[in-house]
Image (tube, rainbow, N blue to C red):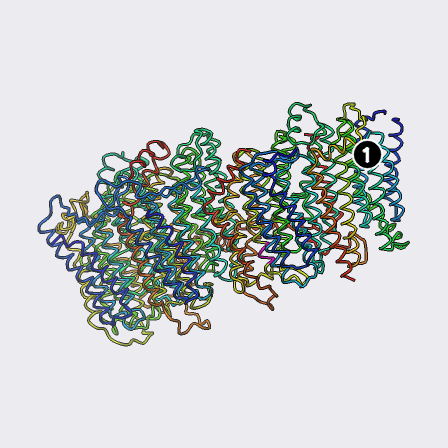
Amino acid sequence: MREFLWLVPALPLLGSVILMFGSAHLSVRTAAMIGVLSVGLAALIAFVISAGFVLDPPVGGVYQQTLWRWFHVGGFSVDVGLRLDPLSLLMMLVTSGVGFFIHLFATEFMEGEQGYGRFFAHLNLFVAAMLLLVLARNFLVLYAGWEGVGLCSYLLIGFWWGDPLNGLAARKAFIVTRIGDTAFLIGLLLIATRLGTLNIASAMTRAHETLHVASPMVTLIAFLLLGGAIGKSAQLPLHTWLPDAMAGPTPVSALIHAATMVTAGVYLIARTHVLFLLAPIAQFTVGIVGALTLLLAGFSALAQNDIKRVLAYSTMSQIGYMFVALGVGAWGAAMFHLMAHAFFKALLFLSAGAVTMRLHHEQDIFKMGGLWRRLPVAFWSFLIGSAALSALPLVTAGFYSKEAILSGAWADGTRGRVLWCAGVVGAFVTGVYIFRVVFIAFFGEEHTHVSGSYGWRVIVPLIVLSTLSLVGGFIQLPPAFGHITLLSDLLSTVLPAPLGATTVMPLLFASFASISGIVVAAALYWRPTHARADATPLWRFWHAAAGFDWLYDRFLVCPVLWAARIDRDDFIDKIYSGIVWVTRAGHFAVRRTQSGRVRLYAAGLALGSICLIAIAVLR
Amino acid sequence: MMTAAAFRAFAPFTLLGALTIVVMLLIAVRRDHRLTALSTIIGLSLCCVVLLFSAPASPVPVTPLFIVDGTALFYAGLVLGSALIVAIISYAYLASSGHAAREEYYLLLLTATLGAAVLPESIDFTSFFLGIEVLSISLLGLIAYASPRQGAAEAGTKYLVLSGAASAFLLFGMALIYAEVGTMSFVRIGVEAHTGDPADLYRLVGVAMILTGVGFKLSLVPFHMWTPDVYEGAPAPVTAFVAVVSKIAVFSVILRYFNLAESHADTSLRLGLEAVAILSMLGGNLLALLQNNVKRLLAYSSIAHLGYLLVGFLAADSLGNMAVAYYLAAYAVTTLGAFGIVALLSVPGTGRDADQIENYRGLFRTHPFLAGGLTLMLLSLAGMPPTMGFIGKFYLVAAGVDSRLFWPVVALVVGSVIGLYYYSRVLVAMAMPIEHVPVRRAAAPLFGKAVIAALLVLLVTLGVYPAPAIAVIRVAVGHG
Amino acid sequence: MATVPLDQGLLLAAILFTLGLVGVLARRNLLFILMSLEVMLNAAGVAFIVAGARWAAPGGQVMFILVLTLAATEVSVGLALILLMHRRIPTLDADAGDQLKG
Amino acid sequence: MNSTFEISAIVAVLATVMTITRASAVHALLYLTVSLLAVALVFFVLGAPFAAALEVIIYAGAIMVLFVFVIMMLNIGDMAADLERAWLTPSMWIGPSFLAVLLAIELGVVVTAGGYGHRAGSVVDARAVGVALVGPYMLAVELASFLLLAGLVAAFHLGRSITRAD
Amino acid sequence: MILLWLLCVPAVGGALAWLAEAAHPNWSRWISIGVLSLDLLLALALISPATSSGHPAWIASFDRPWIPQLGISFELDLDGLSLVLILLTLALSLISVVISWTEITERVGLFHANLLWTTTGVIGVFLALDMFLFFFFWELMLVPMYFLIALWGHENRFYAAIKFFLFTQGSGLIMLVAILALVFIHQHATGHLTFDYLALLGTKMNSMTAFWLMLGFFVAFVVKLPAVPFHTWLPDAHTEAPTAGSVLLAGVLLKTGAYGLLRFVVPLFPDAAHAFAPVAMTLAVIGILYGALLAFGQNDMKRLVAYSSISHMGFILLGVFAWNTLALDGVVVQMLAHGVSTGALFILVGALQERIHTRDMRFMGGLWASLPRLSAFGMFFAIASLGLPGLGNFIGEFLILLGSFHVSVAFTVFAAGGLVAAAAYSLLLVQRAFHGRIEPFPGRTGLFDLTTPHLVVMTVLMLSIVGLGVYPQPVLYQVAPGLSLLQHSGQASTGLRARVAEQP
């Protein structure tokens, strides 16, 4: 069965190609079928392979598959190959599984839209690229998936291309992430030249063997990889694309935030943890970046009125948690949270989508209100998602994964304690901002008219994801809670360090923070009509996410645009124009001597002769 | 006094002289344009044929004034061949004019050719000077010919005055040298120059003044100013003659003088010549840059081409001599073709030739063959493959590089680039659609086109496969 | 016969030559220009005679005769041209003929 | 006899100066004739009696007569002389004179510096010249005849054009 | 002998196509297609069979005396590098004929003649191993190209054509001087006058001379490439040329510059080139970034693509002067990929101009609605040009960066910055032309989408660029022996001679 591993990325790719070329000829129904079935089949195969993997692990815990030799130049070769180990297995399952449900949801959500087939073509490609990314055995193949993900995000964020703003957001997403990608690529060049290979496993081995701990080289490599991860995972300071990426259709947001794209950075760092272990400074930086991002994003989420933007900032914040985990070496916790986050964030986006699709795509939470009665399915889904996000203790997956991270941080010495504090503050803020949305949007007075009804393609994904958000955490419980270690057992062959907290105090403290956040939200926003606070400078500061966009605009974008504009005609060309001008001037100057006057001509003759004689005589 | 071998070797030129007399007598008997033209053409062809037969007899001295050797025969052949082509084109040109006295034209053409043809053989100041003057006086008549044309008399006057002054310089220079060394024979001047006083001021100044005179005939900067005016004022075939035949002849004789009298050794003269070469290349091309009159444009470009030739001249070795020979051949074919096409397009009765650049608009549509021909000619002038001009320029640059003539080669490159601009202006004009009322154009006669076709074949064949021509040149001038 | 220093003879020729040149350059009347040309050619002839006298060889005189031939031819053709020109534009001003330029 | 050379040379130069400065064509022509005659005397002094004779016969005789014919044909009168005077302004003179002075200085320096005190004066008579002409210079004579022929034809043709133009 | 045929077929075909116009314009077109297909088959027949032990560097040779007096022979040699580039040339020429079917309606015969002659010249450049012959073809290809621009171009065609002509011809003459100097230095050293490239390899000279001669060659090739600051002819020429002209210019003619750098500059003057590498690589990096900046600022779509070429060619210059196997292989792939992707973009711009009669992106927007296929292809090739992995350009750029990383980290890092810039301008193109608000400009209704011939052409191009990106190994295999020979030619020319002599 494992030999069909290549089908997992190939099927969505095939679906994408068929849809791309055939979208003009296919009916909406067929397009949806192809789009969903390709991912569904991939998910099924992934599930079967995973089952086989768990039940009958291959030798060494790794299954590898070489498809073809990509290129072989001067002793340097890159193979297109796949690698299945517990880490990629987890990612594969999450991506294909969550991806499938998002696809299913999208078939209904996107009904009646222009370019239905094109949408699914891109969506399929997105999943295919992500699967390639996670399954890649070679850094360059991983990079291919990495870029493919970036491309698809561009295509999908700008899906409604009729509005130039969407295009702008899409371009911003691509270019900002590409800055990180370029750093990543340079890191790859460094790996290739220093370690002589781009095969991930052998590169890690060689790094371990040849590079010293904290040597400048390995630190540099780690930082460059971190650059890539920051870009894709929307961490500081390359995070500005993510809120704007909400311009895309809601299923796209779900896909970007839950199953693909933003998790790639986390995956990359987990994948290359050997390097980060060798470079403690880089690893700590990961944690710092994560902590800063989770705080910044958390506070920014407090000041948003657009339901999707709140979710976008919450994603940044949650990825920040994962970075914190990576920073403290709680690799498994990061992956655990990644998985849990995939469930509840997909759920949140889909339920938000379910809300907006009934409200004529109204996304301002202050224009909603009282929806819990009108849209019970969406309300309950959103509520479960919110609970998981704010890590409501005991019953949600988010609680267990976040606790794993915080205990990991707590266990990591002084530096870890600092990160732990940030995490706890973040947990409090998370509770506040997400329940602010819940209270404003779903309770209070009704402001809008609700129309239509849901089909099964909306309801089923919501139910499934709700379930997973609630019970998905039970695969890994902390020692204090029964000590289930399914996940850490699985990952133990690839990722070092055990999962889970050993002490109870910090755990209780964090739980308290989450709950108090919810309570504060309830206190503040139960009566949402008085709660608008747009005017205060503080609100505006956080609404603009601390002004990073403004800063970049002012100091990076504008200068480049200015330079491009003033140099549109290429000042170097002016040099040549100058030469031409001088030549023409020379022409007109010498032409004046051709006056037609014979005596002048004779004077020329005489002058020439005089000069020649002078040269002859004077030497 | 003259041996049989000398007679045989000199036969083409004797024949040419006789031909002149015969044509003159023919005109006296019966004024008939076609007859005169035909006898001229046949006679010139005959001279060319005879020339081939005198080759085996060479090298042989003919009186102290001349020597018939490979170099001489090669250039004489170029002169005679070019004259023949000019004669044919002239017939096409004059046939369409209503001018009454067209016959003397051929007479003057023949005397001019004679003057030009004896120059390559000259090894003495007397023959040098006489050849140039026979050529110049005949040209004076030709330039002012067909006088209803605007500017013909003006062009003639300018040529008269300036040519006279140039001749005076030339003669004075010769006299100075004669005063210094006591001989007018090139070879003996060379000997004297070697044995005589190194500070021979008379000789140096003499050569400088000779160069003034020759520079005028070759229209080198700064002695060039007459060129465009005369080219414009003269009938197109005469322009071709001035541009080609007189240039080849004068260049060959000055080349001979410098080779024999070994003035190349003199650094100060070389400096002067380098300056003249550079000025000619740059000045000629600059002057042509935005020129709207095709004849003037070609005149300016010929100034530049003579400047290019000076690079080979300055190289002053076997390679340089061969380069000059090939380039002159290429220049002859190309310039004859270009002016030939101008002549074929002109209607002599209208007062001016087809010399405005507007006249060439849409030529590709109305005269595709001539337009295509002119395109190739201009490409050759610009030194682009697959034409003789390309090989020629290559050869010259080779000679220049081999002799380490840094600045002249730089000027050649710069000049060529400028040249490209104005040649392509004409090319572009021919391809443009006709906007205004079409200019009156002659319907070129078939034999005129045939001449152009022959030139084109030569141009391309020797441009793609120049080995035979180079072999001939190597035999003729390679060891000169 | 007494002898003349070579440089004196050539000096005379040079002065005559220069004067002729001044005439060519400074006069606007074509007739005068033609006369000045004759002066220049004559100066060249003088130079040849002087040079020939130095070497006591006939070459200088031969050359002088040829120069004389040229002078005669040039004057005849030149005068014919001047007449032609005068018929066309009734002036002898050399500067008037500037149709051909540029 | 050296003074003969000097006197005639000075006369020749002065007459030439007059030639190129006269406003009247006829006056100029007369001065030119004087100059040519003086030059003929110089030739005689230099030992070239044949050349001296030719100078008188052909230059002063034939060529000058041609000029006279043309002057008569063109019927140049006082008006033309006034015009000439008007043209002879300093602005017309200065440039050419400057050039000429430059050339004169150059030639003068060269001529006097390079003469090395050689003297000229042995007689080469008409016979010697004649022998040379039919000897080594035979073909030159032939060519000179073609020169004359060309001049003849050209002048003839241009003359025809003049009558046609009437 | 087959090499001679390779040259003669398009040369004669051009004349035939010209003459055939008299019968019917379509005759010219069909003749061109036939001739180019035939030539393509000839070239395909030369692909050397894959064996595990590798294949000889020189696949075919042809050598006859040409101008024996000057030591010039008509020497054609083909190695994998030449072959690959010739295949690209022929394929793009063939495509040019197809896409000109409706665009060119005037003087059809002459157009195709010029097109085929350009092809001839380019093939000659890729084949000639006699320096004179090389220069001959180098100049020869300019002339028909000049006419293609000057006669069938757009509004400002004369200016553009002359600019192109002057730049390339001027630099060509400088190269001529350098060639001659090299030949004479060789002659003085050995007493043997020859223009044979293989004989001239390893000519001894002092480092100053070598530097100047190298510079002479370098300028000629870098103008053609083009690199900053000799690039300003390119946007004008590309913009004003007819579509086929742009395709040939970008796809093929620029490659002759790269080929020259590979074949001549470094092998002939290894030490000088090595010493010069920092300067060249600086120019390359400036080219990459500056070209991108200029591309970003354009309103004219064709100009944007043209400037993007400058940016891409910067990578090639970088790779050549990195001069290791990785970089050189990258250069080859980049040449092919750039030829295909930029060619395709030019075709699309041409098609767009045919439909909406403007290239100004300010007057576009939302074209996806009316021209979905064209827009989709436009998007695809824009993405290819920004170097997405899986497409040919990425392989080229990656290998070049990897190769140059071994040589200089700093240059590589700056060059990699070009990837970000490429994303900026490529996406800007897509955004402004195909996406965005559907502007109600007049004449924008009832536009017809790409027709079948165009679709076929675009599909072929797309597949080839995907193929190049996914499985470039066949190409790398073809060029490997040639490249390794080049790399070793500077050091041991005698050994090279021996290796050449081994060929049948």
Against E451, is A90 above or below? Answer: above
Is B341 inside the magenta-drawn segment?
yes
- Which residue is more in the foreground, A2 or B421? B421
Query: How many numbered tags mark residues here?
Result: 1
Name the secondary structure under disc 1.
helix
On the image, the x and y values in percent for residue E12 come to 40, 55
Side of E134 relative to A618 (left or right): left
Left or right of residue B94: residue B478: left
Find disc 1 in the rendering and name its residue: D50
Dot 1 alpha-carbon crowd within 10 angstroms: few under 14, some 14 to 19, many 20 or more:
many
Q: Check disc 1 and give the amino acid type.
A: Phe
- Whole-percent x and y of residue E243? 42, 60
For the record, the magenta segment spans: B339-343
- Measuring from the top left, give residue B268's x and y in whole percent: 65, 31
Residue displayed at 26% across by 76% down: A452
Q: Nearer the viewer, residue E290 or B140?
A: B140
The numbered mark 1 sits on a residue in which chain? D
Q: Quadrant of the N terminus of chain B?
A: top right
Determine whether, in the image, residue A176 is placed left or right of residue C5: left
Which quadrant holds residue B257?
top right
Q: Is residue A293 visible?
A: no
Which quarter of the rendered picture does the C terminus of chain B lie within?
top right
